Image (tube, rainbow, N blue to C red):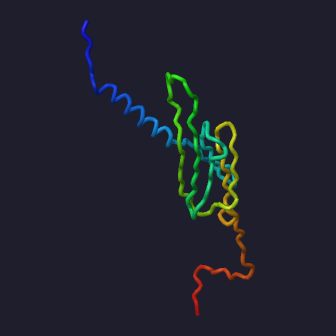
Amino acid sequence: MATRFDPFQEMDRVLAQVLASDRASATMPMDLYRDGDHYVLHVDLPGADPGTIDVSVDDRTLTIRAQRSARTEHDVQWLAKERPVGQYARQLTVGRGLALDRISATYTDGVLTLTVPVAEEARPRRIEVQHGAASTPIEAGATAD
């Protein structure tokens, strides 16, 4: 029985695996919503070491970084190794009107949650309209002298 040999098939498989691993390690899925006077950002960081999570703000850029280390089992034969390792990073440009100095962050069950308050000056408020008491009504047909 003859078998067909494709020398590029294995190279394609390895290359696809490497590229998929790089893309997977760079992804950081997130949800963002507004809840009253603050925004809430949930970022998936499964398996990230909590000590490597870094959240910083520089001007209007919010940066989130985390590291997922490779497992170091020795003398094992890997049958599948699909979980990405390496540095995660994501940058978001945020608009004006947020209290960036009051961001709070928690990391629970592989999810980083950031709470970003809306700045006091950017919150909606009602403006009271003053009514003038000494206004003179204009009558129809009146002429100005």
* Quarter of the figure that contains the C terminus: bottom right
In the drawing, does residue 2 fall left or right of residue 84?
Answer: left
Q: Nearer the viewer, residue 34 or 136?
A: 34
Please tell me which residue is depicted at 58% across the width and 40% down the height of the picture. 68
- Furthest-top residue in view? 1
- The location of residue 13, given as percent across then percent down, is 37, 28
Q: Is residue 125 above or below residue 86?
A: below
- The location of residue 55, given as percent across then percent down, is 62, 53
Please tell me which residue is depicted at 34% across the width and 26% down the height of the picture. 10
- Occupied quadrant, residue 30: top right
In the drawing, does residue 145 fall left or right of residue 127?
Answer: left
- Furthest-right residue in view? 133
Q: Nearer the viewer, residue 75 or 140?
A: 75
- Furthest-bottom residue in view? 145
Please tell me which residue is depicted at 68% across the width and 56% down the height of the picture. 103
* Quarter of the figure that contains the N terminus: top left
- Furthest-front residue in view? 75
- The location of residue 81, given as percent across then percent down, is 50, 28
Tally the marks.
0
- The location of residue 58, given as percent across then percent down, is 58, 62
